Amino acid sequence: MAGQSVVSMVDFELVARDGNARAGILKTEHGEVETPLFMGVATKGAVKTMTPEDVKATGTSALISNAFHLYLRPGLELIKKHGGLHGFMDWDAVLFTDSGGFQVIRQGFFIKVTDEGMKYHAENGEVKVYTPEESARTQMVLGSDIAMVLDECPPHDASVKRVKRAVDRTIRWAKEFKEVHDRKEQGVFAIVQGTRFEGLREECASELVKMDFDGYGIGGLSIGEGRDEMLKAIERTAPLLPEERPRYFMGLGSPADLLDTIGMGIDVFDSALPTRNARHGTVLTMKGQYNIKRAEFRDDMRPLEEGCDCYACRNFTRAYIRHLFKEKEMLALRLLSIHNLRFNQRLMERAREAIIEGRFKEFRKETLGSMSGK
Ligand SMILES: [Zn+2]
């Protein structure tokens, strides 16, 4: 530790390395989780269509919620009455909160980013500014295990001048966040910005690392730039971050993206992709994906994926789940969400095992080959 003001209880232990891929254990107030870690997304306090018991049964041991959303609705007072966000959601395992920068832009509350913070429309129409300090206080009240600093995420095609301004703000806001944050039980992750500009990413990473955070997010990628550009940026950013801290790539969830970036040294992920796919009828399997609505599954007596140990696969046929989907029964969405989330967890479990056994490269190649039918 580099002598910063608050030393949090959060700790990260590297268990194994295989090339750049890492297996570790993230230790928090609400338990320890193994990395590579895939988190379920509970933006507004729930994983869509699933109960906390459903979520846990898929092997999901961590969720991420959006602090800014919850700050606006239902508001901190109500959540405080439940003893914090864990109590409100009845989630007793690991919980991350995102500061909200990215979500705000997509949800239409947002007006603009200023040097002070994010200007937004409150429910009563008033114009307010959400500052880094307010973001820190919000997340301390929510009591998540990991808080993310407020950052500015410019569009992927923004000019170098605009990205430079976002990087400067991200660094300054990280400092301001840290100054008011004093909840020892809660770890704080900073977020590296800089889009495609390598020099700016380097500058952002190096300034944030000097401040000694519990972990580092890589942000501002996977938002519309090409896949090659994204992978190149991750490959170059990961080595700038300290070996002994977890690295979190925000908003990435396809099997290929997960395996490729685990291979570059990323430890933590979150994405709504598996559950969003589920609601469209898309079933993820180790042999690639398919849509349950297709006519060929009408009489199919097999589970969604042979060999899968999830609740849906242990108890129901494709024919039944297709029938539910066709009849717009809500259970269809729930069962598919259970399967798809379990699929991502099985992928993480296998990746971790492969890293520990020193065969990650082969595992990645075989898995991606089998998924694309090769
Ligand atoms: Zn399954």
Image: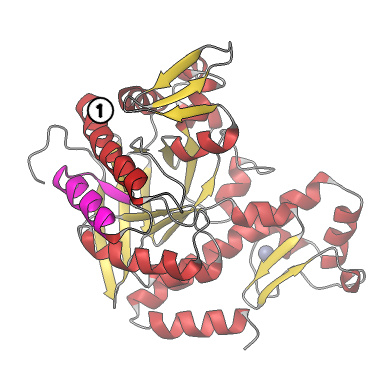
Q: Is residue 305 left or right of residue 156?
A: right
- Residue 263 x/y as whole percent: 37, 73
Name the spot of residue 18 as percent of width and height, x first: 30, 77
Q: Is residue 92 shown to the viewer in this render?
A: no
Depicted 362 relative to depicted 281: above or below: below
Q: Is residue 294 magenta?
A: no
Ligand 1: quadrant of the figure: bottom right
The residue positioned 26% from the left and 28% from the top of the image is 183
Image height of 17 relative to 94, above or below: below
Which quadrant holds residue 17?
bottom left
Measured as percent of width and height from the top left, residue 70 is found at 51, 26
Mark 1, residue position: 181
Q: Looking at the picture, does residue 137 appear above or below residue 332?
A: above
Q: Does the rendering let one see residue 66?
A: yes
Q: Quadrant of the C terminus?
A: bottom right
Looking at the rendered structure, the secondary structure element under dot 1 is: loop
Q: Residue furthest left?
A: 3
Residue 44 in the figure: left or right of residue 96: right
Q: Which residues are magenta?
A: 199-218
Camera-side residue of 332 and 201: 201
Residue 97: percent from left, percent from top = 43, 37
Residue lying farthest to the bottom in this orientation: 374
State the scheme by which the image is colored.
Answer: secondary structure
Q: Looking at the picture, which amino acid does disc 1 mark?
A: His
Does the stretch in magenta take in 217? Answer: yes
- Mostly what secondary structure, the magenta segment? helix
Depth order, front residue of 371/306 = 371
Q: Residue at x 22, y 38 (%)?
A: 8
